Amino acid sequence: MYISTKASPARQREAQLASQLADTETALDRMLWPIAQSAAEFLNAGDFSRLRECGGEECGWLFEDTSRNRSRQWCHMQDCGNLAKVRRFRTRLQSSTKTQ
């Protein structure tokens, strides 16, 4: 059995990009690098049927829905999910006080 020791073209591009970023790295670059790397990994091996856009009104983040029944709606329940539930509750509370 022969195992190639050469890096794949994707890994070569990743290494080249990493070296270019290391030369001009700023605080913003250091923050964005894990996001860019995660996106590249998803594009290479991810299941695009699980790619979703957050349902938050003011959010545009994309996330991979890893829930068993593929029903996740928000990028983070603590942020966008909680905000949506609070808004829904306040709307329901206001409509119930108007009818009384």
Image (cartoon, helix red, strand yellow):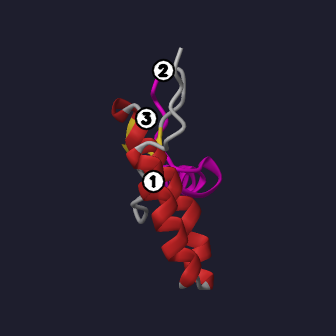
CA separation in Å, label 3 and label 1: 16 Å
Q: Residue at x 53, y 31 (%)?
A: 66
SS class, disc 1: helix
- Horizontal and vertical percent for residue 93? 53, 53
Instruction: Look at the image and say whether residue 89 sits in the magenta stretch.
Output: yes
Disc nearest the viewer among 3 and 1: 1
Q: Residues within 10 Å of mark 2 (few under 14, many from 20)?
A: few
Q: Determine which of the numbered discs, if any, sits on residue 69 in the image.
A: 2
The residue type indicated by label 2 comes to Asn
The chief SS type of the magenta part is helix
Image: magenta residue range: 69-98
- Horizontal and vertical percent for residue 97? 51, 55
The residue type indicated by label 1 comes to Gln
Q: Residues within 10 Å of mark 3 (few under 14, many from 20)?
A: few
Residue in the foreground of this view, choosing between 68 and 22: 22
Residue 53 in view: no
- Horizontal and vertical percent for residue 1? 53, 14
Snapshot quadrant of residue 44: top left
Q: Is residue 49 above or below residue 27?
A: above
CA separation in Å, label 2 and label 1: 36 Å
SS class, disc 2: loop
State yes or no: discs 2 and 3 in contact (Cβ < 8 Å). no
Q: Which residue is mark 1?
A: 12
**Number of marks:** 3
CA separation in Å, label 2 and label 3: 20 Å
Q: Upstream in the sequence, badge 2 or badge 1?
A: 1
The residue type indicated by label 3 comes to Ala
Disc nearest the viewer among 2 and 3: 3
Q: Determine which of the numbered discs, if any, sits on residue 45 in the image.
A: 3
- Say left or right for 26 vs 55: right
Residue in the foreground of this view, choosing between 28 and 73: 28
Residue 75 in view: yes
